Image: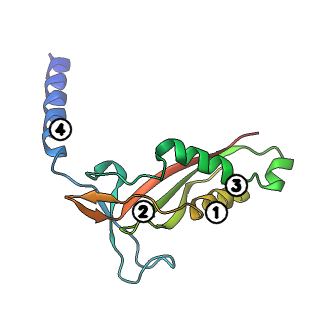
Amino acid sequence: MITALRFILFTLAAMMTLVAGAQVRHVTTVNPMSPHQSPYGMEVYEYDYVDVQPQFPGGEHGLINFVNKTREYPYYAYKKRIQGRVLCSFIVGTDGKISHISVIRGAGDESLNREAMRVIGEMPRWSVGKVGGQPVPVRVVLPIAFRL
């Protein structure tokens, strides 16, 4: 009886989330006190919650090729056989430029984190994300792997 009631409540909650999800936008405010921000701050949309998602030139395949061609294994990490994945975040602006690059979860070695940020910083302009036909800044999360 209790499990049946839990199932019904769970199903109702899921259905309400689906109905409401079409109207809810996940927007965050970038910290205006960070040295990498404008002094006024800005609203940033999350990647999965925009009508048109920003895209790297050449799509996902182009992004993978760019990362593989641009990434250089740091000497110290290579000599010590350090491997890992750096989870980075950045904002694709309304003009397609990359900004606000940060490491969400590092690989355990600072040189790998710096290299991942360098690679993202060298990216060309992306196509912009849009909400209601208007360009908006969108936060993108990208993992960069370092494997020997």
Q: Are marks 1 and 4 in contact (CB under 8 Å)?
A: no
* Rendered residue at 48%/43% (across/down): 60
**Disc 3 marks which residue?**
112
Question: Real-space Cα distance between discs 4 and 2?
Answer: 27 Å
* Percent coordinates x, y for residue 109 in the rendering: 72, 54
Q: Which amino acid type is shown beneath numbered disc 1?
A: Arg
Tag 2's secondary structure?
Answer: strand
Q: How crowded is mark 2: few (under 14 residues within 10 Å), some or many (20 or more)?
A: many
Q: Distance between the residues labelled 4 and 3?
A: 39 Å
Q: Distance between the residues labelled 3 and 1?
A: 10 Å
Mark 1: few/some/many CA within 10 Å (<14, 14-19, 20+): some
| Mark 3 element type | helix
- State which mark lies toward you, 4 or 2: 2
Viewport quadrant of the C terminus: top right
Q: Name the residue under label 1.
A: 118
Q: Name the residue under label 2.
A: 92
Q: Are marks 2 and 1 in contact (CB under 8 Å)?
A: no
- Label located before the other in sequence (3 or 2): 2
Instruction: Determine crowd level at label 3: few under 14, some 14-19, many 20+ residues with C-alpha closer than 10 A.
Output: many
Residue farthest to the right, as pictured: 79
Residue 18 image label: 4
Tag 4 or tag 1, which sits nearer the N-term?
A: 4
The front one of 114 and 54 is 54
Residue type, mark 2 in image: Val
x, y (%) of residue 115? 68, 58
Toward the viewer: 108 or 65? 65
Whole-angstrom CA distance, mark 1 to mark 4, is 39 Å
